Amino acid sequence: MRIPNIPGFDQQALEKYFKNTGWLMLAKVGVMLVKSIVTTFALSNYLNSGQFGILNYPMTIVTFSTAIAALGLDGFITRELLSSPQKSNTYLGTAFIMRVMAGLVTLPLVYLAYHVIDANSVKPLQTPFRYVFIVAFVAIVQSVNIIDSFFQSKIQGKYIMYVQLTGNILSTLTKLIFILLKLPLVWFVYSLLLDAVFVAVSYIFIYQSKGNNIFQWRFDKGVAIHLLKHSWPLAFSAVLGTIYMKIDQGMIGSYLNIDQLGIYSNVANLSESYYFIPVTVVTSVFPAIMHARNTDKDRYYKRLQNLYDLMVVLSLGAAIILSFGSTFIFHSFLKKEYWPGAPVLSVYVWAGVFSFLGTASGQYLIAEGYTRLAMVRTGAGAIVNIVLNIFWIPKYGIIGAAYATLIAYAVAAFFILFIPKTRGQGVQMLKSLFLFSLFQKAFNR
């Protein structure tokens, strides 16, 4: 199938990079459907809202530990492998060991975080620590996922598709079997860890089957120092990112009843079910954008503008559908106890517009070497989210958390407007957000 011509991108480049995007999209659409049908609907209807809140709380804490354990290496390793493919065994081996060690370090941090939160919560945490500790091992298991960077550097998205589909089919079947057997909640807690295991095993299998060998990976201390030196801002940024993306759920668990967390978690799952789209598209076209940066600056900025336009079109479409269809979705597919989530979804879903733009502009910051600025803007979003949640969750409940998330995402995305060297990109994003750029293209044809 021929890819349609898009102004600002070479047709040959589109054919190459969007072919990779197509594979990635197919995999991620499968993931979205699986999560929406099984996790958001089937599992929610099997568990009551309180149980669903207890099940989701461990990931609220563990998301921070997995961000720490990743060390910001994934995207950076992809870039290094693009430059030096002959060193793949050294880069992969070093990154893997670094991530395993970091994952082990996070286990006592998870213990500390849980008990500090429990001691300072308005209400005692209703999720047992053993549930959180079980899920905490995800940070170690996901070390294997560094193989993803190898396939990204080879522009072999189809293998990532195989991994994602295999892992998520196994995950879906596991949860469906647990539901049919009417197993207690703890089994579904273990299934969260099994999700990571399925994906990790799939990565190893496909990597080995393509003539590679993980036993040839080797650790290099010098490479480790080099990776840490350049990736720590990305790692810190990832941690800050999890704060402004997940702190609302953690604070709801501390301020409100656990059933409110269950309802809100359902809203978050629905709202974020399509967040794979910007990551997939941006990852696939990033090599083309980098090539333009090195060869033709005018084309480089045009491609960035086109990317922002695409992000706005995609996110607005999803936001409009979910916002206006929120009541229908909740009343048609979920139990009555989840229905209060409908108005919350109609607010929360608009944060996706800023998330899409933030993902796209994040690649610009990486391309220009502004990794510390990426960290700072994420931190700004995190601070805004925390402060607003402190005041709005006790006063307005879960819809207050949704408004706090929306504002925090907007602040993080457009923080670059306040920095002189990146203000131009902020203006380009505003042109896309208010559809000025799209109207210009339409009238200039």
Image (cartoon, rainbow, N blue to C red):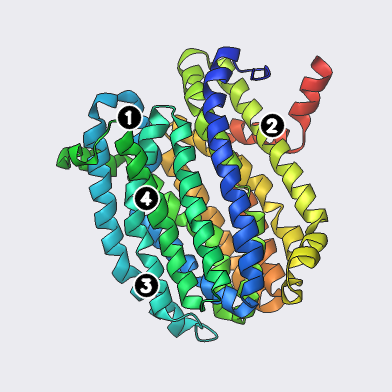
Q: CA distance from mark 1 to mark 3?
A: 34 Å
- Under tag 2, what secondary structure? helix
Q: Quadrant of the N terminus?
A: top right
Disc 3 residue type (three-letter): Phe
Q: CA distance from mark 2 to mark 3?
A: 42 Å
- Under tag 1, what secondary structure? helix
Task: Residue 81: give its label.
Answer: 1
Q: Disc 1 or 3, which lies upstream in sequence?
A: 1
Residue under the image location 63 percent in, 47 percent down: 274
Q: Which residue is mark 3?
A: 133
Q: Which residue is mark 4?
A: 200
Q: Nearer the viewer, mark 4 or mark 2?
A: 4
Q: Disc 1 or 2, which lies upstream in sequence?
A: 1
User: Contact (CB < 8 A) between labels 1 and 3?
Assistant: no
Q: Disc 1 or 4, which lies upstream in sequence?
A: 1
| Looking at the image, residue 378 lies above or below residue 439 | below
